[in-house]
Amino acid sequence: MRKAFLRHVRRFPWVTNVTLYGCLFAGGDFVHQWFSRRDRIDWSHTRNVALVAFSFHGNFNFFWMRFLERRFPGNSAGMVMRKLFLDQTAAAPLATSVFYTGVSFLEGKEDITADWREKFLNTYKTGLMFWPFMQFLNFALVPLYVRTTFTGCCAFVWATFLCFSRQSGDGTAGAALAWMFPLKEDESEPAKEDLASRDKTDAPDRQR
C-alpha cells in the first residue's frame, strides 16, 4: 500500500499532493465544526475552506517547496535554516492572509479584511509555536516529492485552529485551548462561591 502510494505520488506529484493537501485542510474545518456543533454542520463553510485550500494553499505550497529546494538544495543545517527562515517570514504570513480574506470573500462579506485585521497578528504568533518545528522536520527529513503532503497533514491540525479562530476565537493559542478543554461546571462553582463569600465579607468594610 505504502509503495503503491509513493509510486503514484512520483508519477503524479502535483495532482496527488494538491488533492491530499486540500482534503486534509478541509477536514480540519469539519473536525472543528463536529466538536463545536455536531448536529448542524455548515457544509457551505467547509466548501469555502476547501475552495481556498485547493485553489491557493495546496498549489502554492507545492510550487513553493520546489522553489525553496532549487534555491537552497539539500538538507544540511545551513540550507534547512535558510528554507525555514524564508518559509516563516514570507510564505506563512501570505497563507494566513489568504485564508482569512479568501473565506470572507467567498462568504460575500462587505469587508473581507475585517477578520484579517482583527486576528492576523495573533494567528501568526501562534503559528510560530507550531510551524517552525513541523517545517524543520519537513525540510530535513521528508523527500521533496511528498513535502506538500506532509505539510497537508500538519495543516489538518492548523486548519482546525484557523477555523475556530475565524468563527469564535481571536487567533491565540489560549482561546483554542479554552475551547478544547473547557472548565467543568463543578470546577467553576467553587470559584463562584469563593467570590460570593468574599463579597459578603467585604460588604461591611465598604459600608464603613
Image: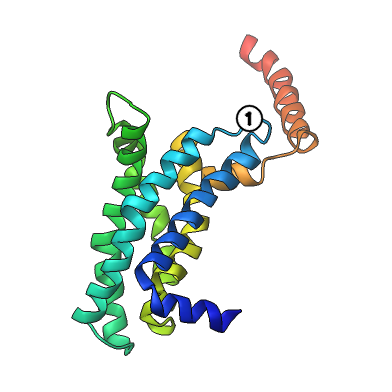
Which of 132 and 73 lies nearest the eye of the viewer? 73
The answer to whether any part of residue 171 appears in the image is: no
Q: Residue at x 28, y 31 (%)?
A: 112
- Residue 66, given in percent of the width and then of the height, sits at 27, 74
Quarter of the image for residue 208 reads top right
Q: Residue at x 35, y 68 (%)?
A: 14
Residue picked out by circle 1: 40
In the visual, does 3 lie left or right of 76?
Answer: right
**Does 120 appear above or below 87?**
above
The answer to whether any part of residue 57 appears in the image is: yes
Which of 74 and 205 lies nearest the eye of the viewer? 74
Figure quadrant of the N terminus? bottom right
Q: Secondary structure at mark 1?
A: loop
**The residue positioned farthest toward the right in the image shown:** 186
In the visual, does 128 lie left or right of 28?
Answer: left
Which of 110 and 149 lies nearest the eye of the viewer? 149
Q: Residue at x 36, y 79 (%)?
A: 144
**The residue positioned farthest toward the top in the image shown:** 207
Q: Residue at x 30, y 79 (%)?
A: 81
Residue type at numbered disc 1: Arg
- Residue 152, given in percent of the width and then of the height, sits at 45, 63
The colour scheme of the drawn protein is rainbow
**Dot 1, crowdedness within 10 Å: few (<14), some or many (≥20)?**
few
In the visual, does 77 lie left or right of 166?
Answer: left
- Residue 78, given in percent of the width and then of the height, sits at 27, 86
- Residue 169, given in percent of the width and then of the height, sits at 48, 38
Which of 90 and 170 lies nearest the eye of the viewer? 90
In the visual, does 74 lie left or right of 1?
Answer: left
